Amino acid sequence: MIRIGATIYIIVEVCHQRRVMAERVQFHKFSATRNSVYSTKEYHGLMSKSIAPRCSNSSSSDGATEDSSNKSKVPFGYNRKDVILIGLGVTFFGIGLKGGLEFLGVDPLQAGNVVQLVLVLGLTVGWISTYIFRVSNKEMTYAQQLRDYEMKVMEKRLEGLSEAELEALLEQVEEEKRLASRD
């Protein structure tokens, strides 16, 4: 069932890419007939602005797309700002824990040892638990690379198909989907 969904997604993507390429060729033919004063960078900027409103679900009435919707969301902890924030958080947690232990009357040397033990063990156990979680969900680097490679190979094969072959493949996938839904 997952492969059927992935196949449908790839077919739709390939058809979409072919449509976008056809629009680019038409736009290029149109702009080539005029005396264009745009640089290559400006030309590609115009291209993305002229095609994006058709492909996106923008709610603005003038057809402009929002930059935030085009950027993919990066999970927390995967950019520099997040790593700095995590480091500062751990540091301030250690300082606060040491100060709190000293406030409760624990010897400063003992408080430092406790904080060091808690942070090292806590961070080590936390890091190992994320690894175990990724292994159990098969989200390791190799597994992800393998899935990406399989998708790229499938996309490449679909790009080589003609429109008639794509139509036949889409009908076959829909037939398999109907058969799977009956069971």
Image (tube, rainbow, N blue to C red):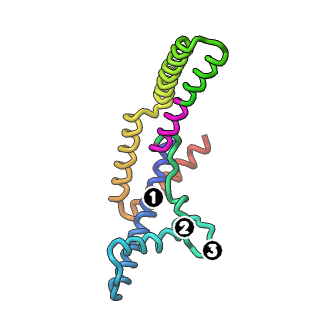
**Which circle's residue, 1 or 2, is located before the other in the chain?**
1
Of the numbered discs in the image, which one, if any, rests on residue 61? 3
User: Is residue 1 visible in the rendered structure shown here?
Assistant: no
37 and 175: which is toward the camera: 37
Q: What residue is shown at x 40% (from left), y 41% (from top)?
A: 147
Q: What element carries label 1?
A: helix
Q: Is mark 2 on a helix, strand or loop?
A: loop
176 left or right, relative to 164: right
Above or below, 128 relative to 48: above
Above or below, 141 relative to 19: above
Nearer to us of marks 3 and 1 is: 3
**Which circle's residue, 3 or 1, is located before the other in the chain?**
1
What amino acid is found at the position of numbered circle 3 in the picture? Answer: Ser
Q: Badge 2: how crowded within 10 Å, few (<14), some, or many (20+)?
A: some
Q: Does the magenta stretch include residue 82?
A: yes
Q: What stretch of residues is rendered in magenta?
A: 79-91
38 and 34: which is toward the camera: 38
Residue highlighted by disc 1: 13
Residue highlighted by disc 2: 65
Q: What element carries label 3?
A: loop
**Disc 1, disc 2: CB below 8 Å?**
no
What amino acid is found at the position of numbered circle 1 in the picture? Answer: Glu
What amino acid is found at the position of numbered circle 2 in the picture? Answer: Thr
74 left or right, relative to 152: right
